[in-house]
Image: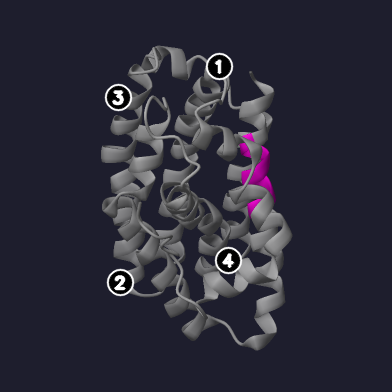
Amino acid sequence: MPPFRDPAPKGSLFDRLRGANEPVWLSYVRHDFVRRLAAGTLPEPAFRFYLIQDYLFLVQFARAYALAAYKADTLDDMRQAANSMRVILDDEMNLHVKFCAGWGLTIDDILKVPEAPQCMAYTRFVLEAGNAGDILDLLVALAPCVVGYAEIANRLVADPATRRDGNPYREWIETYAGEDYQQVAAKAVAQLDRLEARRAGSGRFPALVKLFAGASKLEADFWQMGLDAA
């Protein structure tokens, strides 16, 4: 099996934010929901509810990137935000619906379910971070999701304890460990570094650490939401 690939190079802003928040970060990337995905023992109702809420999350995720385009101060950052929004709306949401269909969920099934409090809490946290701050604040709040999923999937594919044969969640794991998604995460990490160089001095780091911690905690709550639905 392949060795673990860290999506964030050592010394990158993401790596430093993660290191400054190790306990809450590990509570997210090593959550029991993730462990049960790896073992193939996650109750199917938990995964189905997670899938529904993840689709509803993507709707707000697209709005966050629209806000990032508005907050951008360079054309390159504006284009990256606009492309991310397009990918979510045109590609990811359609793929998500197809994936859900394999779990017996139609788009009507998804849309009739209201957003769970945990979904609302995280998405509104992200949007508020962007509205109150700048593009760096917004993308730091988004980073635990974008880059965290890449790290989680890479850890699972590198772990010999992860169940391969007969694991109903293998496709989910391999999707986020795949090269397409890894490139998404790598671009997000690189953009954070560019923004830090332009917008952040050493005095800003503590506020970014706090923002990253809040987002990571809400990501862990999102996993717990799935478990609680089983």
SS of the residue under disc 2: helix
Q: Which residue is mark 4?
A: 137
Left or right, residue 218 beside residue 64: right
- Indicate whether 17 appears above or below 107: below
Q: Which residue is at a point 35% across and 42% down the rendered structure image?
A: 174
SS of the residue under disc 1: helix
Marks 4 and 3, the one that precedes in the sequence? 3
Label 3 is placed on what type of residue? Answer: Lys
**Residue 219 falls inside the magenta stretch:** yes
Left or right, residue 155 beside residue 1: right
Label 2 is placed on what type of residue? Answer: Leu
Marks 4 and 2, the one that precedes in the sequence? 2
Marks 1 and 4, the one that precedes in the sequence? 1
User: In front here: 80 or 192?
Assistant: 192
Marks 3 and 2, the one that precedes in the sequence? 2
Q: Which residue is mark 1?
A: 45
Tell me the CA gap for discs 4 and 3: 33 Å
Tell me the CA gap for discs 4 and 2: 18 Å
Q: Which residue is mark 3?
A: 98
Q: Residues within 10 Å of mark 3 (few under 14, many from 20)?
A: some
Q: What is the magenta range?
A: 216-223
- Specify the color scheme: one colour
Q: Which residue is mark 2?
A: 75
Tags 1 and 4 touching, CB below 8 Å: no
Tags 1 and 2 touching, CB below 8 Å: no
